[in-house]
Image: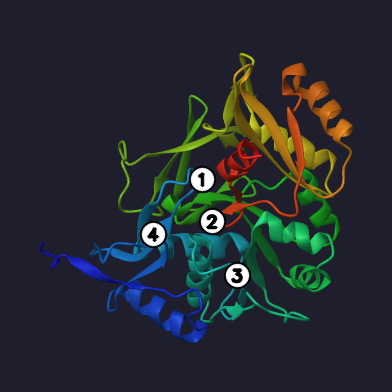
Amino acid sequence: MDNSSQRKILRVSPACEIPQLARDITAALAGNGPTLGFGEVISEFAPAQAAVVIGTSGTTGTPKEISLSANALLSSARASNSFLEAKSGDTWSLLLPLTHVAAVNVFVRAIELGTIPVDLRNHVGEYPRVDFTAIVPTQLFRALNGDDHLLKHLQGAKGVLVGGAALSAGVRNQAIAAGIRVVTTYGMSETSGGCVYNGEILDGVELEIRGGSIFIRGKVLALNLNLNDGWFETNDLGEVVDGKVVVIGRSDDVIISGGENLSLNKVESILTDLFPAIQCAAFSVEDPQWGESLHVAVVGQVDRESITTVLENRLGSFAKPKGIHFVESLPLLGIGKVDRKRLAQGISHE
């Protein structure tokens, strides 16, 4: 195979030293270094325009490789820094693993400000102060429920991006009350990470709602996408309310139980809003009577009857869970997103 029009991929170790990685990313963006591979990258070569390749299983569990150009990554970083009113010399901390686009973005944003990220992935004890950071909802939950060092770190930042999975209104409100300047983000690897902050579309990004589905266009899009007139159709559902983009959930998170449509995202949202001290995940199990039966996994303490009552009152009798399972932690797919298939498999093997 002729690879003359492609770039060799250098796979990045999750344990890579931060100064060296900052240099490698700078070279990749400038085009005078190899393409960097993060996560589950199998390919040896990438398109010539690709600065970074993200290997991810996404929310479906199907492996895929997302190629991002320097233009896409820089456009995303500049729009992010602009929204946050970040200035030259401002610092970012790295609290995310080097397997996800969100971690890559921390580097690119910091490089644009003339700094390199402060590595806090395995930090113990008090955290140093930084201007900005990016985390997933699970980390925010932990900060609000016992991790005092992380809480203080987040409180000291001028902006804390929270993405990778849906952030419940209850946890968000709790964080704001604790003095954390939360910025909820929406995006995916295909859009170079977050492209909607606090419901506002970032500069250089276009977003439309068509038939309830979210479509995105702009410089932040990945190279290897199937586009229609430049538009990328996501698997997410949304609406615009008072000029703000509201992400409702994924189109594939709706199950049919007893002939009724039931959104797993809606179930989780209701429970986490009313019981902010718990983490939960709704998932389905094949059922000969119901077709798909609703189950809920819970981390924390809450009465089973309270969960059942809330869901029946808010959604109807068909939303009564067929099983409520207390677990020590929720299995994750990538960062932040719950592995619902793994939960269902665990139940089916019981």
Residue 86, disc = 3
At 58% across and 81% down in the image, what residue appears?
89
| Mark nearer the viewer, 1 or 3 | 1
Q: Earlier in the sequence, mark 4 or mark 2?
A: 4
Q: Is the residue 275 above or below the residue 256 in the image?
A: below
Where is residue 49? Give x, y as percent: 26, 63
Crowding around mark 3 (Cα neighbors within 10 Å: few <14, some 14 to 19, many 20+) is: many
In this rendering, would 188 be left or right of 66? right
| Mark nearer the viewer, 1 or 4 | 1
SS class of the residue under badge 3? loop
Crowding around mark 1 (Cα neighbors within 10 Å: few <14, some 14 to 19, many 20+) is: some
The residue under label 4 is: 72
The residue under label 2 is: 334
Marks 1,3: beta carbons within 8 A: no
Marks 2,1: beta carbons within 8 A: yes
The amino acid type of the residue labelled 3 equals Ala
The amino acid type of the residue labelled 4 equals Ala
SS class of the residue under badge 2? loop
The residue under label 1 is: 59
Q: Earlier in the sequence, mark 2 or mark 1?
A: 1
Crowding around mark 4 (Cα neighbors within 10 Å: few <14, some 14 to 19, many 20+) is: many
Determine the image quadrant of residue 84.
bottom right
Where is residue 34? Give x, y as percent: 29, 75
The amino acid type of the residue labelled 1 equals Thr
The amino acid type of the residue labelled 2 equals Gly
Q: Is residue 268 visible?
A: yes
Alpha-carbon span between mark 2 and mark 3 = 28 Å
Where is residue 175? Give x, y as percent: 80, 56
| Mark nearer the viewer, 2 or 3 | 2
